[in-house]
């Protein structure tokens, strides 16, 4: 619903109701307005009873010069032209924006935000001109993603134990029995393969999965840990994917304490990330794991565990 400014008549009503001792919410109901609108209107005065309808209306009518500005391409085409020159010189939109603010510190009208630059590029009709601009962006995307959901969370892991609480013996790899776990996703995100890597010995275990939901992953990882000797299954560190939502049940079932890396911090599970890269030699991206046999998985696991490792000498 589009916001509509208060009229002079409404402000006079507010003044009358304030003098009657009505609360903000009662005034809002009478005017069919949000109570926050009334609160903001009255907040401009030192006290509620100093509210003047005429003064308030005059103040609101004084439109800010920055309100309702024309697009920068119409108002300041030279600024946009200079920004595009820097883009073609392979500066990112953010670098351009920061540079302008430094070079023209005393000339705000020559500033331009990185968002304005992006909007101009992607508002350009599809064709050679847009292609020429997007080729100089880091990601070279021809279409822009909806940024409103860029950081939308997939869900929440209930009561995760942070990697910051992990004992020092896990961090320095002084004793074996501490694992890193993950999933390698298959074709069209419809299948997956579980991966476990022991941090000290770099032992790799590949876990066949019938699905990638939390229950299936928990049951499959539990089967693997139940076959491992007690002293070799102390903890597991994983990312915050919802496939590990049943981490508490996994700990209760196997005794393996589960730690979670910080969001968007794959380096905190570097051993697992590197191993996943090696596994892709056997199961490239686009592999449908529902069609991969147990023998193929065991063969890949055997080869991974019997290759010379520089880090192990």
Image (spheres, rainbow, N blue to C red):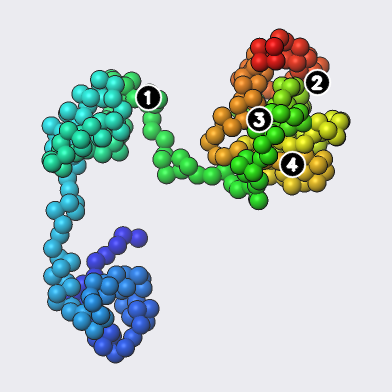
- Give the CA separation, mark 1 to mark 4: 40 Å
Crowdedness of circle 3 by 10 Å Cα count: few (<14), some, many (20+)?
Answer: few
The relative height of residue 74 versus residue 82 in the rendered view (above or below) is below
Crowdedness of circle 4 by 10 Å Cα count: few (<14), some, many (20+)?
Answer: some
Crowdedness of circle 1 by 10 Å Cα count: few (<14), some, many (20+)?
Answer: few
User: Which one is closest to the eye, mark 4 or mark 3?
Assistant: 3
User: Which one is closest to the eye, mark 4 or mark 2?
Assistant: 4
- Is 238 on the left or on the right of 62, as rendered? right
Q: Earlier in the sequence, mark 4 or mark 3?
A: 3
x and y, in percent, of residue 154 in the image: 57, 43
The residue to which callout 3 is attached is: 172
User: Which one is closest to the eye, mark 1 or mark 4?
Assistant: 4
* Outermost residue toward the top in this view: 308
Residue shown at 82%/40% (left/top)?
Answer: 254
Which element type, helix, strand or loop, lies under badge 2? helix
* Outermost residue toward the bottom in this view: 20
Q: How many marks?
A: 4
Q: Earlier in the sequence, mark 1 or mark 4?
A: 1
Q: Quadrant of residue 229?
A: top right
The residue to which callout 1 is attached is: 138
The residue to which callout 2 is attached is: 294
Taking depth in this image into account, of 283 and 160 the one nearest to the observer is 160
Residue shown at 64%/25% (left/top)?
Answer: 271
Q: Earlier in the sequence, mark 4 or mark 2?
A: 4
- Give the CA separation, mark 3 to mark 1: 36 Å
Question: In the image, which disc is placed on residue 111?
Answer: none
Report if the CB atoms under discs 2 and 1 are less than 8 Å apart. Answer: no
């Amino acid at each position: 619903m589009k916001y509509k400014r208060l009229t002079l008549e409404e402000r006079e009503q507010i003044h009358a109701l304030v003098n009657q001792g009505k609360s903000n919410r009662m005034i809002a109901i009478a005017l069919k307005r949000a109570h926050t609108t009334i609160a903001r209107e009255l907040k401009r005065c030192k006290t509620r009873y100093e509210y003047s309808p005429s003064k308030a209306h005059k103040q609101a009518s004084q439109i800010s010069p920055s309100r309702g500005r024309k697009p920068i391409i119409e108002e300041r085409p030279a600024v946009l032209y200079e920004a595009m020159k820097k883009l073609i010189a392979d500066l990112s939109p953010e670098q351009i924006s920061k540079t302008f603010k430094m070079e023209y510190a005393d000339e705000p009208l020559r500033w331009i935000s990185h968002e304005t630059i992006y909007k101009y590029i992607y508002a350009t009709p599809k064709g050679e001109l847009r292609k020429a601009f997007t080729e100089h962006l880091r990601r070279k995307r021809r279409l822009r993603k909806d940024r409103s959901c860029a950081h939308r969370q997939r869900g929440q892991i209930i009561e995760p134990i942070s990697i910051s609480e992990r004992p020092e013996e896990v961090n320095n790899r002084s004793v074996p029995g501490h694992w890193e776990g993950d999933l390698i996703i298959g074709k069209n995100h419809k299948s997956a393969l579980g991966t476990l890597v022991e941090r000290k010995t770099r032992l790799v275990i590949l876990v066949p999965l019938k699905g990638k939901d939390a229950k299936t992953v928990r049951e499959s990882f539990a089967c693997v840990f139940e076959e491992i000797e007690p002293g070799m299954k102390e903890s597991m560190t994983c990312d915050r994917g919802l496939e590990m939502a049943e981490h508490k049940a996994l700990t209760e079932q196997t005794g393996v304490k589960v730690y979670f890396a910080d969001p968007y911090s794959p380096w905190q599970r570097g051993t697992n990330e590197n191993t996943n890269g090696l596994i892709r030699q056997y199961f490239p991206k686009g592999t449908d794991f529902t069609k991969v046999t147990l023998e193929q998985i065991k063969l890949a696991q055997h080869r991974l565990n019997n290759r010379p490792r520089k880090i192990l000498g």
